[in-house]
Amino acid sequence: MSLSFQLRRTIVNTVSFAGFAGWFFFVSIVSPPILADDQIQAEKPRPELGPQTGIANVEVEEDTVWQLFSLLFVEVTEQLSVNQDKYLSDPVAYYRFLDKTLVDRWDSKSTSRALLGKSYYASLDAQQREALADAVSQTLIRYAYEGLENYGGQLFSVADAVVNADKGRGWVQVLVASPMFPDFNLDLLIKRNLDGVWRAVDVRVKGLTYAKIKKYEYRELFEQQGFGGLMVSLNSKNETFFSAVCEAAGDITKGAPC
């Protein structure tokens, strides 16, 4: 197996089990060329988020975001490094961990809207939007299960955070430090919801975002099979996967996803 292939697989799996695992799917689909070591860790300019007022407020918001996501990735690193074997054998315990990290810090409704597009999403009623958001959440959780066994001691930390406090949008840059391969960065697009809490809505690596790649599949299914067909496709994949995971685990305490 070539070093390039190992490096790509490590990057893919690292992001997937971190919880923000959509990257695992679309990298495996589009298979972009491996970047040179100096490209992977290249410095990126802070993203421009447009003009805003109240510099002091911006600083407060950026400090809030930094602390919020720093605590999250400290917990992710600790839990994976200490409990990987436990989570591999106990899918219920892993689900609980993901539920309070991935699910609690991810805005699946906004991700669903980005995947389906404004016009299609606007055609859904409240119940359909809730169902789609739940399916997206379960899909992200499934990606995290798929990458867990390949965890290799990677460390996750916040490298930068920039927000537009007026618009309630921003980016968090996360450094992924690997003991075996060159470090690399991923960016989380974040949004401040009506409850005032910042949550992730998309993930980007080297200019490619999860929503940008996956939206074509979602919209094609919606166009050809309608909302019902889209939900059948998403739910069947998740249910089939989790059924196999729970069956392999044997006699365990019942709970989601089993």
Image (tube, helix red, strand yellow):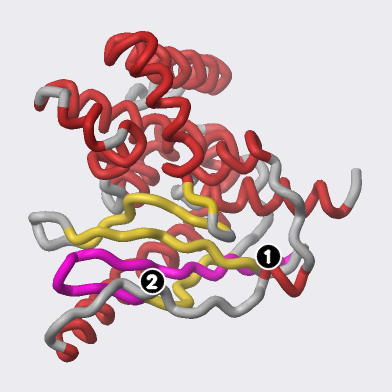
Q: Is residue 165 left or right of residue 25?
A: left
Q: How would you classify the magenta stretch by its main secondary structure?
A: strand
Question: Measured from the top left, where is residue 128 in percent x and y?
Answer: 18, 22
Which image quarter: residue 98? top left
Amino acid on which the number 2 mark rests in the picture:
Ser
Which image quarter: residue 172? bottom left
| Residue at left offset 27%, top offset 15% | 227
Question: Measured from the top left, where is residue 235 in percent x and y?
Answer: 38, 17
Which label number is shown at residue 71? none
Can residue 82 be seen here? Answer: no
Question: Measured from the top left, where is residue 223 in percent x and y?
Answer: 35, 16
Element at badge 2?
A: helix
Q: Is residue 83 left or right of residue 96?
A: right
Question: Measured from the top left, where is residue 232 in percent x and y?
Answer: 36, 11
Amino acid on which the number 1 mark rests in the picture:
Ser
Calculate the distance from the C-alpha at mark 2 to the C-alpha at mark 1: 18 Å
Q: Which residues are magenta?
A: 162-179
Which is nearer the eye, 106 or 42?
Answer: 42
Which label number is shown at residue 178? 1
